[in-house]
Amino acid sequence: MKEIFISWSKSKSGELAKYTKHILEALLPNTRFFMSEEDIHAGECVQDTIIRHIEQCDILILCFTSENKKSPWLLYEAGYASGLHKRVIPFLFDHDSLWHSWIDNPMNIAKEIDFSNDSFETDFLDAFSLSDSPYTESCIKEYREKVHVIKEKYRQVDVQCEDLVEKLIAVDKFTINSPYYRDKVAYFLSGFETFELWKAIIQSFLFTGKYLWIYGRKNMKLFGGNFNDLFEYLDKKAVQPNMGGIDFKVLFLNPEAEEVHYAHKDQDIFESELRTTISRAKRIIGSNKVLQQCFKMYSNRREEIIIRVDNCIIYAKPHFDMYGMPNIMTNSKFEVFSASSEKGKECIKKYLAVWNEAIYMFD
């Protein structure tokens, strides 16, 4: 009798593994299954039992989620099974284009079953030599529905923000002990206004994004020469009707506004840098009338920092000293949440209120 070993790590993966076992037991009644959560009995040596079942199994299923892709146990079990020339099948419950980059062997040579792919059902049937029948179709439909329910239960941020949050988590520079999650908001404890954050923002927007709204002051990092590909892309979009569906907005602080004297502790340097960056932005945009309409200058005090990247909001709140001067924001904490959340809707409302009161930078 064949045996299938189901490997998992962490709570979400554990629930998915249990239901995977349940469905496969219904579809493969002549197969034994082993899952450590359910099949290790009191008094048994856990590690010895796991090793024994890996050695005697025919297939090892790896229940992969975004939370457990660096789990030592998953690495060990998958690697040990591969070394014994067992068949390893990764089940990708969370989409991650770089899912196998964390291990050279065996994951980069194992054909995965990806729940986000249209070919999921075909791949599933082929992997276990199952025939396409009303019964298997019903089981797989039930399976997909249950997987969706489990994923929703463990979802830490709204689905619209998952890709961006994953990009930010991948930046080790500012994710030590973060993010933590509460009410579908990802809280990063450091990294705001860093080059790494801006790089992730631009990568998320380029070629596939619709919205990029920036409520900045000087916007120096955006116009520092590192993101020429963004402006080349926008320049091409500007010749299409309605910019090809792109909604790009950038707010600068007006260098003529009284607020300039309260926007930075070192006023002389700040005003000089602000005017220099505006001049640089004007050179980059040039005579492109469509892109010129994407830039405005505000005169109000900036009480909140709002960046919209498609359906995600990156949010931070300035902190002021006893004299009312804002502290430096570079590498400070920030939040990421959905634009469709109540907090997100409020941020969009506030951004548009500032935008509507601001003046065009190129007039």
Image: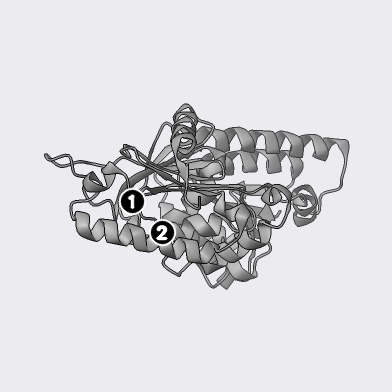
- SS at circle 2: helix
How many neighbours does mark 1 have within 10 angstroms: few (below 14), some (14-19), or many (20 or more)? many
Rendering coords of residue 219 (x, y %): 39, 56
Residue matched to label 2: 278
Closest to the observer, 188 or 210: 210
309 or 281, nearer to the observer = 281
Q: Earlier in the sequence, mark 2 or mark 1?
A: 1
In front here: 96 or 158? 158
What residue appears at the point 42 percent right and 63 percent down from the top-left corner? 279
Q: Residue type at mark 2? A: Ile
Labels 2 & 1 near each other (Cβ < 8 A): yes
Answer yes or no: is residue 187 visible.
no
Give the farthest residue toward the top.
342
Residue 186: image location, x then y, percent:
41, 42
Q: Which residue is mark 1?
A: 255
Instruction: Rate crowding at label 2 as few (under 14), some (14 to 19) or many (20 or more) other CA atoms within 10 Å.
Output: many
Q: Is residue 223 left or right of residue 190?
A: right
Seen from the viewer's position, the closer of residues 130 and 50 is 130
- Residue 282 shows which numbered tag? none
- Tell me which corner region of the image, top left, top right, bottom left or bottom right, holds residue 303: top left
| Horizontal side of residue 319 vs 215, given as left or right | left
Name the residue rendered at 49%, 66% in the picture.
283
Q: Position of residue 293 (x, y in %)?
A: 56, 49
Q: Please say if 253 is above or below 268.
A: above
Q: Residue at x 49, y 55 (%)?
A: 201
Local secondary structure at mark 1: loop
Color style of the picture: one colour
**How far is mark 2 from mark 1, CA to CA?**
9 Å
